[in-house]
Every structure is written in structure tokens, then in C-alpha cells.
Image: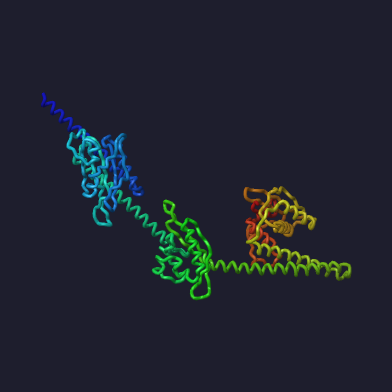
Amino acid sequence: MSNGNRGTGIDETVTADLQRSVVLLSVVTDALATVANTETKTDRSTLAQTICDVLVANGDVLVSAWVGTTDDSDEVSPIASAERDGEESVAVSGQTSKADTSGDTLIQRALSEDQILAGSDTDTDADTRHTAIAIPLRTERETVGEDVTVGVLVVSGVGLELTDPVQSAFSSLGDAVATKMNAIETSIEDADTQCRRQLSAIFESTFEFLCLLDPDGTILRVNDAALEFGDHDRAAIIDQFVWETPWWHGNEDRKAALKEAISHAASGEFVRYEVEFETGDSDDTAIIDFSLSPVFDEDGAVKLLVSEGHDITAQREHAQDLQRERERLEFMNRILRHNLLNGLNVVGARADILQGFVADDGEQHLETIQHRVEEMTELVGTMRTFMKAIVEGETQEFESRSLREAVQSCVETVERDSPNVTVSLGAIPPIPVRADELLDEVVENLLKNAIQHNDKPAPEVSIEAAAGDQTVELWISDNGPGVPDEQKRKIVEKTIEELSNPGSGFGLFLVREIVESYGGDIRIDDNTPEGATFVVTLPRA
């Protein structure tokens, strides 16, 4: 009877051990699947934490899991852990280092986790003893040509039955985790290498003069463009203070300004200023747009300085040439304004005086003189307006102008000078636009154009406007012959070279120049039922 009872107890124990082994194998299999499904773009800590969570969460067998990695000093540092509620993660202080250095899976058993932590090993009943397993994470490292241990996986539980298949499964898990960690590290290194190559390509391909500096001003790297500016040797430049290099020789004030700029940049400021350098042995100088940009580390401290130089000598010379051209135009404007216009006014006044002294056969000649004086006076006014737009175009400070007032003033002039023309003034919103005193010239020229190119005996012109969020559109429509589609763009985009004389399309050319200087544009649409509509878009003030 008693023998039968003992046999039943043994069978139950064997069955329980087999069940625990099956559960452990299932847990390890789940962990292996997790490793296999982890992408290399993750990081090692995330992988380790995921494995620990899977080992503890599945099967109610393991109470804790812990992963540590090694450094060059063979010290094991924890990067992830997981434990069941109320339990502590077992580090197995003594066995961990042994497993790491030997590369073998080590098992430690004790009556409690405190004994395991103390390094004790007790031979006691399998159902009640605590068991900790230290599994080395070994993988082949191509750079050294042999297997290396990159860390340790430690798991613990109560009543674990570590059969050969279970131990083999844990060993496979350790190899899989190590291999994945190595793949992650390789992926990071490859990405870093690719990034460095891309940055190097950008650094060397630019025409800007680039240097990488320590915050104290020591040159760490310099690109080819900077070396070619002055024909300097790289070996003689690297590891030198930048102000001691040949670029900055010969001018103590220039050196002092650079040192001060580096000091400001090293404190986190962006610095930019222009500096002149001598070019070779000649007396020529180059004007460089020079800047220093701080690069910060994760803690907000300045790690590097990027110095950048851009040769703006050609731009400066071009700007000087433009300024000289503006001065010439202004001189011509003064001649037109004072000398030529005053002379025309004198001729016109004398012609008016002769009105009562000329015989009938000379009346036609006098009218010709008066007509030509009027034409030339108008042309001088147009040229003055054009040169004002050109000379002051880039430096003119625009103001808020009432579009309604400008339109009303021009309409009154047209109605007075052309009584046969009917002008219909529609809605003009009381919204100011960004312009100057030449706005009247724009409206007046468009009105004259609508009248002069009208083939009707009684020309009709309508004006209206509408405001948008950022702009105001002005529409000036006529009942003339209209403009063919293929001519619309040509008319408003005509260049100076295409103007045969100031009376052929010059007014619209002037309108476009003025409107574009305001930041607006002009186009031609078809009017309904006939004629053309000139649409001017102006920015709101």
C-alpha cells in the first residue's frame, strides 16, 4: 500500500516537473519570437526591456528578468529589468560577472532571493528553492573575428526545472539577443557612417569657406574652398588658432575683432559681420561675409563653432556700379527738370504771346509749334516719372495712399481734357494701398491708354475696384477693339529694347515698372461685351 503511494507521488512530481519545463520552453520560445520580430532601427535598451517584459509576463514561472551590458572594463551595467508584482529583480552579483567572462550559462539556487543576492548556493527541495540563471549574451563580432560577450541576461523564479532542453533554449535566447544587439549596433554605426559621408560631401562641395572650430578658436577641419582662398596647406592650418592662420595675418584690428567674435560665439551667440582680406600679392581686396554659428550638445553647452565665409566682392562692386548709374540718372533728371523743361516753358509762353501777332498764313505754323511744345513737355514729364521710378525704386519708402482719391483726381482730369469721353466710376473701396505719389501716374496712363486706342467716336471707360485680404484690384475697362490673346502678355511685358520710341507703349511700360515696384502686378482681360480690361493688383497698406 505504502509502495503504491510512493509511486504515485513520484509520478506526480515528474508530471509537475514536465509541466514546468513545458511552460519554461513556451516562455523562452515567445521571447525568441520577440527578438526575431524586433527591427534593427530600435535601440538596445528597448530590445532588452521588451525581452524582460515578455519573460516575466508569460507563464507565471519567472518572477524577474534583468539585462546588463559590458563595457571596455568588463563591468556589467543594467539597461533593463522587469519583475512580477511584489518581487525584486535578481542581479546575481557574483555569478553575473562569471557568466560574462566565462561565456557559460551559470545557475544559482538558494532558499531565498536574499541568499542569491548574497552569492549563496543551497541544495534544497526543487519546489521551494529560488533559482537564478545567468545567461551570457555572446555573438560573433566581425571587427575582431571572434565571439565576444556583450552582456548578460539574468532570470529568476521558484521551483524551476532546468532540464537540458530548457537550458539549451535559454542559451539560444542569449545568442539571439546578442546577435540582435550586434545588428542594432551595426545599423547605428552604418547610419552614422552614411551621415558622416553626406555631411563631408556637403562640407567639401560648397563654394563657401567653411571651418569647424573648437570653442577656443582651434581649427578642427577646413574645406577645400577655404584653403584655395589664399592657397594654404591643410596640414599647416589644422590645430592652429584661427587668428594665427595666414588668412588673418597683417592686420591686428582684424585679429582682435575675430577673437571677440569667437568669444561671443563660444557663449552661444550667432555672430556675423563683413571683413576685408588682401588677395595674394596684389593690392586688391576681397570682401567676405563672415559668420560664426555655435553648435550645442545635449546639455546646451557649446560643443563646436562653424565659421562660414562668403565672397561678396562681386556683389559689392555690382552695387557700386548700380549706385553710379543711379547718380547719372538723377543728374539727367535734374537736367530735364530744370534746364529742358524750363526752356520748353519759355518757348510755350512766347508762342502764346505770338498768338495775336501772326498773320493768317502763319497761324498753322504757330499751332504746330504749340502742339509740339505740349508733346515735348508731356514727354519730359513722363521721362522724369520713369527716372524717379528707376532711381528710387529700391530705396523708395512707400506710404499709405488712397486709391479712391487717386482715381477721382485722374477722372476729373480726363473729363476736363476729353469732353467726348464718358467715364463711369463704380465702387472704389476706401481702403489704402501701399504706394507713393506715382500712383496717380499709373491711373492716368491707364485711362489715357483706354481712350487713345479706342476706335469709337465716343469712347466709354468704366472704373471699379475690390479689396481682398492682402491686395486691392483695380479694373479699368473700355469699349474699344480689345486686345488679342496672343498680344496680352506682350503688351504688359514689353522691354525697353522693344520700345521703338517713348510714344509707342512707353506709358504701359512705365505703369508696369511702377506697379511692380509696389509689389503688385498688371494683366489684361477681355471686357464684356467688347473691349479690354486692365487689371492692376496693389498690396494693401
Image height of 435 relative to 208, above or below: above
- Count of residue discs: 0
The residue that appears at 66% across and 48% down in the rendered structure is: 467
Figure quadrant of the N terminus: top left
| Residue found at the very far top of the displayed protein | 1
Q: Is residue 454 visible?
A: no
Residue 336 in percent (x, y) is at 73, 68
Camera-side residue of 453 and 255: 255
Residue 400 in percent (x, y) is at 68, 53
Q: Is residue 309 left or right of residue 239?
A: right
Residue 216 in percent (x, y) is at 43, 61
Camera-side residue of 455 and 297: 297
Quadrant of res 385: bottom right
Camera-side residue of 541 and 536: 541
Q: Is residue 205 left or right of residue 28?
A: right
Q: Is residue 447 left or right of residue 35?
A: right
Camera-side residue of 35 and 84: 84
Q: Is residue 165 visible?
A: yes
Residue 226 in percent (x, y) is at 45, 67
The residue that appears at 51% across and 72% down in the rendered structure is: 278
**According to the image, what is the colour scheme of the structure?**
rainbow
Image height of 240 relative to 529, above or below: below
